[in-house]
Image (tube, rainbow, N blue to C red):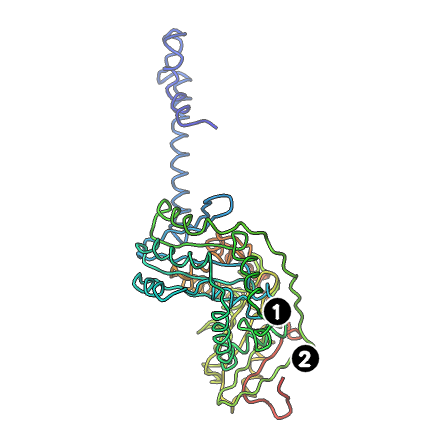
Amino acid sequence: MTTVNEKKEIAVGANKYSPNKYSPNEYSPNKYSPQFRIATFLHVFFIIICLWGHILAQGQEKDRVWKNQPEKVAVNDHLSFIYQQDLSSGITVVHILVKGGKRAVPVSQRGLSFITTGLAVEMVDIEEVRDLTQLAAVHYYHVEGDFATISIRTLSGNLEKTLKIIARVLRKPLFSDLRISSVKSYLEHRQKAEADSPEQLMELTFLNALFTSYAGSIYGDPESLKNIKRKDILDFYKRFFNHAHMVISVCTDLSKAEIIPIISKNFASFPPGETQRLETVQASVPEKKEIFLKKDNQQVLISFGALLPAVSRKNFALIFLLENLLGKGIGSKLWPLRDKRELAYSLTTRFIQMQEAGVLTIFLKTDISKREEAQQALKGLVIDLYNQGITSEDLAITKVRSRADFLRGNETKENRVEWLAYFEALGLGFDYLEAFFSQLEQVTLDDLNTYLKKVLDPHQLLEVVIGEIPGDAEET
């Protein structure tokens, strides 16, 4: 490839070839000579190429959703992190994803991942809690099907002090019998809260019915908690809290040069670890496709659940579109059940996409007196959509809604670092945060109708009703 300097030499070729070797009369370019015309053409051509490249670069910059694109920063052979600079506030959010969620735990020991993750970030003494409060720092954790997560939010000026406290505990947590017993008591409380929440109970029921790998509560149950011993917690921590299973994402106003030494200082000493092989996810729809759970209250939750295929860049865009098409607010396919027919207090769709499978839930809440009518209306709507598919106008509107929904969901630094780590852990790559929009636009009408036919097959839908149950039905 010709460099800029080489092109400049070509444009003023006489300086290179004369006057040393050749006579000026023979080779000195003038406005009539072929050399001058060639040099002029090349010079103009070079200017056009530069201008066109500048225009393309401006166009690409304009097409980008985020001005500062996320990137992966390698600290050493084992430690890397996802970094995005956001100058909108003087706040830094650090998100740590550990690839050791519910799936990494035997059903007989459900709750193990939650206990381990909780103790890994629980402060050892009250002084550390006080210091974090004075630093205006907060941190929280959660466990899902494929991974556990830890989020840390603090003022950027206090980041180094905040991470020094939290990472010190995370590197060497205290797994004492007293602390384990305390966390187990907390999990018993969360189990009761989960059973009292219709939405959480619905989600758990679908996971129990459709999967073995994701069955059971992240909080465990009375029997599984009894099976969890200190040695099990230590083993789980050693297996998963290492560089082989950790994804770190950072969104901050700090520069890359400022953030690298802070991350290195606090996370470089974690062991490299070895990738753990997990069993393949087994998913199937049970023969009995109606599940009734009795709850004595004035509302009834009616829901349908559908299995999703393994994750891919295209499949994620498809399920995001389908979720918005069905039940994301005004204008969705479910909306007339509430707006025109007044059959629901609330209605929505929600999906959980995991690495090898997923589940889509479609549900509404209604009054006891409208249970039967609402149940038939919701089922009829899903079947009609399956039979008729959608139009090109539906697709165009849904793309706009989905784009807006994704943008709203990634507006804050907290949400964005979660999505970055989530995409990276699923195998889509952290850059899918930006690529999602182009993937969305590539979806054709035939793509979405084909996906819709596969997911919303009436013979594969599972129905869960929570509340008053029909007289001829038994509680499952």
Q: Residue at x 64, y 92 (%)?
A: 472
Outermost right residue: 287
Q: Quadrant of the C terminus?
A: bottom right
Query: Percent x, y for residue 419?
Result: 46, 59
Q: Amino acid at mark 1?
A: Leu
Please state which of residues 72 and 384 is positioned toward the viewer in this rendering.
72
First in sequence: mark 2 vs mark 1: 2
The image quadrant of residue 382 is bottom right
Residue marked by disc 2: 288
Query: Percent x, y for residue 258?
Result: 35, 47
The image quadrant of residue 310 is bottom right
Is 385 placed left or right of 65 in the picture? right
Outermost front residue: 177
Query: Percent x, y for residue 142?
Result: 48, 66
Secondary structure type for disc 2: loop
State the separation of the CA atoms marked 2 and 1. Answer: 15 Å
Q: Answer yes or no: do the residues labelled 2 and 1 have beta carbons within 8 Å?
A: no
Is 211 placed left or right of 467 in the picture? right
Is 43 placed left or right of 399 in the picture? left
- Compared to residue 340, the image places residue 433 above or below, namely above
Secondary structure type for disc 1: strand
- Compared to residue 251, the image places residue 213 above or below, namely below
Circle 2 Cα neighbour tier, 10 Å, few/some/many (<14 / 14–19 / ≥20): few
Q: Amino acid at mark 2?
A: Lys
Residue marked by disc 1: 307
